Image (spheres, grey):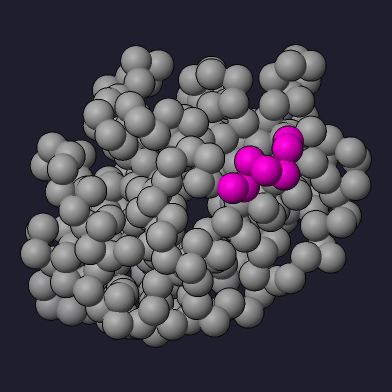
Amino acid sequence: MRDACESDLSRRRFRLTRGPSRTVIENAEKSYVFGFNAVISEEIERIEDLPHDQRAFAYEGAGAACAVLDLITLTRGRRLRELLAGPAAHHPFAAHLGAGRGYALLRLRPVRAGRRAHPLLRWLAVDGFGFGWSMARADRMVGERAMPDLLSRAHCALFDQGLGRLLWYHDCASPDDVAARVASYPAIRRAALWSGVGFAAAYTGGAEADELWWLTDHAGADGFRPHLAQGCAFAVAARAQAGPLPDHVAQAVPILTGGEPEEAAAWADTALMILGHDPHTHEDYQAWQAHTRRLWARRHQV
């Protein structure tokens, strides 16, 4: 079982100085811990008792717990597959992200995560690994801008997406602070970081409308406006699978993408269809992102 106090991110020396934003971010982590413990206690149905906007984070925790149990009991991903086929059927992004966090808990490379689950979404586990690994080692991953030796070079961009999501938490959804943090990394890493920031800004929330406009300006000034928009498009596509969009997502999408939520989700869906039959490699996953950015750019004639 995970200790509920783990959702108190101030224990990790995160910069949680903004009251309402801190509440949003810590509630997301409380729901993650709730979902993790629901699997361990074999009460996963309790996740559906949570508010609608918190269930995605709880299923992320459930994905982490299933991955951990599968690894320590050598059940070859059975629990994660059952989770995806059943309770988390409408939250596949969350469950795969959570699986990566489970691998990070056990300090194992996530490359095999979900291999028998979704052939393309399984790469989200590397993103989740980046988030979980960086959360536990923020001094090195954020302060020193390190990269773990566990990953091959080809997977570093996927890791950095998760790190970008973590930066949104670390700097408490402050656009100025998050942008300054991203700018401290080498240029070769910033595209993936901005993608992760865009995902978290829409998926988790925590910023007001005027702050999201500032975030958009920062990403544009850094040359990564399409990556911010792509991350947001993936977030709305993930949230849309679970039913009506939470208010913070509906507010963020027009600002971060310049399109309505249905349009932004359609970019991600259309980009997936462009990949054709049986996309499954990490190159396919990155092509999915690239096609989404092209559709965004075509819409805005960039």
Give the residue at x 27% y 46%. Answer: 192
Residue 199 is a magenta residue: no
Q: Nearer the viewer, residue 277 or 94?
A: 94
The answer to whether 110 is drawn above or below residue 41 in the figure is: above
Give the residue at x 31% y 36%. Answer: 142
In the drawing, does residue 82 fall left or right of residue 189?
Answer: right
In which quarter of the view is residue 48 placed? Answer: bottom right
Range of the magenta residues?
A: 2-8
Give the residue at x 67% y 43%. Answer: 5
The answer to whether 121 is drawn above or below residue 68 in the figure is: below
Give the residue at x 16% y 72%. Answer: 217
Can the viewer see residue 60?
Answer: no
x and y percentages locating residue 159 in the rendered image: 37, 35
In which quarter of the view is residue 268 placed? Answer: bottom left
Can the viewer see residue 248?
Answer: yes
Q: Nearer the viewer, residue 86 or 102?
A: 102
x and y percentages locating residue 233 in the rendered image: 39, 66
Residue 7 is a magenta residue: yes
In which quarter of the view is residue 65 placed? Answer: top right
